[in-house]
Every structure is written in C-alpha cells, then in structure tokens.
Amino acid sequence: MIIKQIAVFLENRPGKLAEVLEVLSRQDINLRAMSVADTADFGILRLVVNEPDKAVQVLRDANFAVKTTSVLGIKVSDKPGGLLDELKKLNAAGINIEYVYAFAAASVHDARVVLKVDDLEKAEQVLQSPDKAGDPVDGPNFYW
Amino acid sequence: MVVLAGRSTGKVNLTTCTVAGSAQAGFSDFRIERVLLNRLWEGTKVYWNKPVETMNREEMTNLQSTRLQETVQRVYRKVPFYRNKMQEQGLLPEDITNLGDIVKLPFISKQDMRGNYPYGLFAVPLAEIVRIHASSGTTGKPTVVGYTKRDIGIWSEVMARALTYAGASKLSCIQVAYGYGLFTGGLGAHYGAEMIGASVIPASSGNTSRQILLMKDFGTSVLCCTPSYALYIAETIYEMGLSPKDLSLKAGIFGAEPWSERMRKEIEDRLHIKALDIYGLSEIIGPGVACECECQDGLHISEDHFYPEIVNPLTGEVLPDGEKGELVLTTISKEGMPMVRYRTRDLTVLNHDVCTCGRTLVRMGKVLGRSDDMLIIRGVNVFPSQVESVLLSLGETSPHYQLIVDREDNLDKLTVMVELTEEMFSDEVRGLEDLEHKIQGALADVLLVSAKVRLVSPKSIERSEGKAKRVIDNRKI
C-alpha cells in the first residue's frame, strides 16, 4: 500500500540525527521505519512515522528541510527469498526500484519493507494480493 | 664577454667579467655563469629606465600634467561615458590645466565598466585594439579591457622595470608561473621578460612537479607567480627530496593577491631568494603598475603612466601622504582604454620620499585590505555578488549562501555553502548530488576559479542583524 514517507536533509555533522529524533520524540511521534543515505557531506534521513503531517510541521518549525514522498509499504514473508519473490514481480513489470529499506520488526511471521519505485501505482497493483492489502495506516496502533 | 641588459649601470663594470668555459662547455656551465653573474650584480645598481626612475619631482609633475590633459581631451572626444559624466558636472577638458585639477574629475568604478560592457569604454576603434583581457566583474559579466599596440609596449616597459628591480636581465631565465589567458598575469610578465631580453619559460600555472623540473633543468633564476603558489612550490621542492641548492633561483616577483611580511620571510627562507611584491590590475594595465625594488620598502608606481591618488573611500576626498585610504589610479598614457580616476578599492598609503635605491618614483605600501567585499582566490577576483547571481540564475529564490576561504597546503580553497530550500531538496541522493554539481559547474563558469559546493540546512548560516554573513576568510596571510 502507498504510504507517506518523510525525507529530512541532514548535514554530515555529529549530533544532526539526534536533533531530528529529539524533535520527534518531544512531540510523541513514533518511528516505524527509517534509513539514512549518506555521502561525504550530507545524509538523507527517510522516515515512516505514525503522524506524518505533524512530523513534517514540527521538523519544518525546527528549520529542517523536509519533503514528503509516496512510497510503497509491503509485507513479505519472513523466510529466505521472501523479498525476492516480490522484487521479481516488479522486475517482470519493468518497474525500477530507487531505494528500499526495512521496517522495525512488528510481527513474527512477516517482515515489512518500504520501496521507492518509479511507477508507484503500477507497483502497487503488481504486488496486490489479499494478504498484502495491509492494515489501516492511521492511528496509534499503526504497525505498517 | 657579457653585456648588461639595463640601460645604465652602477659601479661594477660587468663587461670585464668573463667566465672560463670548460672542455665540456655544456648546460651546467651556463648555470654556473649565471650564478656568478648574479653574485656580481649584488651591490650594482641597475635601472631599466634611469631618466624616468630617477626623475625629479618637478619634471615628473610636469610630465604627468601634460599627459593628464591629453588623456582628458581624448576621453572627452572619444568616450561618451566620460563626456556625459564631465558634462553632468559642467566640466570641459580645458578646465583641467594642471595636475591639481584632477580632483574636479568624476571617479570611475568597476560597476561603470559593467555598464559599458564590453567595448563601451574603448577610446579607439576595435581595429586599433590588438589584445583583449578580462577579469571577474562584480556579477555575471566579466570586466573587459583592450590594448593598442602602443599600450602593450607600455605594459612591457613597466613590467621590464619591475623585473629589473628584482635583478633580472637578459642573462636571466624567467619562469612565468602565472596563468596565461584572459588573466593578465601570465602574458604581462611574459612581455616584460621578453623586453629585457631574458630567456622566458612560459610555464603557466599548475603542474608543480613539472615547474620544479623546469626550474632545476633550465636554470630558472627569477620566478613570477602568486605568493601562495611560491610557498606551495617551496614545499613541493622539499617533498621531492630537493633543496634550493639544486636550483639557481635568485629572486621572485610575487603578486595578484595580498600577502604579508611573514609570508615574505617564509618564502625567502625556504627558497633562498629575494621576494618582491608586485601590484597591478587589469583595469589599469595588468601586473607592473607598481613593484618593490631591492629595498622592499614600498612598491614604486610607474607614475609616468599611472597617476596615483589616495582618497577617503567614503567621501572621495584626497588624502595626503602617509594616510591610509583607497588607491585611485589614472592612466595618463594608455590609448585603448584610458581610465580616469579609477577606484581600485585597494587600501594603502603613498610615500613620495626618495627611496634608498635612488629611485624617485612614488611608493605605495603593501595593500592593506579592500574597501569592498572582493576576495582574491588563487589570484582571481571573486565577489560574493557573483555567487548570488549564479544561484538566482539557477532559479532558486533568495538563496542564502556563504563563502568560506581556507588555505590548505598554501593553496586557496573556496567552499560555497548553500542553504537548502524545500524546493531544492530531494529524497534521493542522486538528486542532491546533481544539484551540487549543477551549482558547482555554474559557479566555475562565472568565477573562473573552482569552488566546492556544500548544501546545508535551512537557516543554518549565521545571520547578524538579519543579514547573512557572506564571507568567512580563514586564511592567515
């Protein structure tokens, strides 16, 4: 399913990541998934949180450059080749993956993965199956 | 038999000095010859143009006065910009009857050059122009200068004087390690060196180990480059396991950027040479406007061609000798693009006392700073406003940026910090890297010097009283 990801610009300096987390924690925003892409000079922090709109607002107020992007969140079986099966489907459909990272573990049977792809709608269709339709994404019990 | 290049010599008659050749009269013997001669020259007084360099004040004032009047007549007739400016003040060329009248004339600034880009200030048809140089303007467009054949002659003459101050002659090997091209440094030094009949090595800038190889193998005795590059060369010499003893270097003429006495001492100690400061700017002619003599006590201005004034940068009022202010120069012999009362923005002092070297040419102190925010990076003029125009041209609205200049291994490094806006931000590394490269490329095109771009968080650049601090210069000069 399509979910909202928040990307935050991080200067490559000590304490920058902690500053972002500090802002979010003060506002009781919980992280579900995160990854950092880094270069010599900067990093891009990507987050999936329980209250994305609020997170964007508070980070902006704290002078961070923030961008929301639609990404795909999927469940894959927590077994060897689980993710591979899904990627094969995207591959067959000619969809390119720009980046991918995993959720914090939430279930014994499934792993959860975030995918940024060039054709979001199509990717969602390709991967759609009853057990991957997912749970509601909003609310405090959101575990996507 | 050796004939001295200078037109007039002092006590020692060098024509009696011969160096015995050996059976294998080869390259190294030339070097020995040069070294011996160089030693003999110490204690000799050599002028390139003795009548001018030692002219008494009254004669000089008369010469300057005549040349000023001719220049004013010419620019009034040939250059609409000057005519309009003079008419605005109700001035006719005839109102300038002596040197003191120069204060009646309006100033010209770098902005005026931009306003008349590219050829608006030329006083001769393009057919008479034989050379065009350019330096950085305050924004996007470069500052263009044009020379007639005679102007190139004047430039060569003043550069020849400067090189002679350093003890160079037709027996010298002069290595020009200034960049050749639109920048005036390389070709300016080159023509002066050719005029004195020296052997010129047009090495241009860069490729330091090759520079050192040339110095060593060709027996370079005089080096021309920026002072920071001279230090870099010195360091590289030691890194290559060589020492100044392996070279024949005797003197260096260093300029195009400000440097201190501390740097001079370092260069002299490391390279075992005499290091002289040279001053110039393309708007006036290029390097050679002024240069230190062996006394190293102020730079002799070739005032028969460039008339200097020191003014209060705020009021424009002319200041007396010894008072620090902005140097204003008037070219009183140049044809192609005469400059009348050009505001150099360089802060210094003037001294009309006769120098210990015997020269009467007025001396300016080492440049003490700028009255604007121009930076000189690796000899190239850089204005913060250029960076702003580049960022604006890339479609980013009111960009916040900061220039940071460092000196690492004696080379200037420019970093431009750019505050990221949300419009510029991308969640993909590639997107941000593309942005950095785009800005970096556009900056290099306009600044003519490479800069590293660093993206930083919004509002992370320090602001004082709402205005961002545009420049941090960490160089210890």
Image (tube, coloured by chain):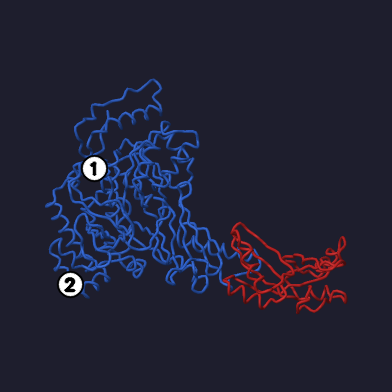
Chain colours: A red, B blue
Q: Is residue B273 above or below residue B300?
A: above
The chain containing the residue under callout 2 comes to B
Three-letter code for the amino acid on which mark 2 is drawn: Leu
Q: Which residue is mark 1?
A: B48
Depth check, front residue: A143 or B2: A143
Quarter of the image for residue B160 reads: top left
Q: Dot 2 surroundings within 10 Å: few (below 14), some, or many (20 or more)? A: some
Depth check, front residue: B398 or B56: B398
Question: Do circles 1 and 2 both sit on a common chain?
Answer: yes
Quarter of the image for residue B108 reads: bottom left
| Disc 1, SS | loop
Q: Is residue B212 above or below residue B374?
A: above
Query: Which callout, 1 or 2, points at the residue further toward the start of the chain?
Result: 1
x, y (%) of residue B21?
Answer: 35, 23
Three-letter code for the amino acid on which mark 1 is drawn: Trp
Q: Is residue B16 left or right of residue B98?
A: right
Q: Which mark is residue B91?
A: 2
The chain containing the residue under callout 1 comes to B
Depth check, front residue: A132 or B301: A132
Q: Is residue B62 left or right of residue B250?
A: left
x, y (%) of residue B327?
Answer: 27, 59
Residue B267 showing in the rendered view: yes
x, y (%) of residue B190?
Answer: 35, 46
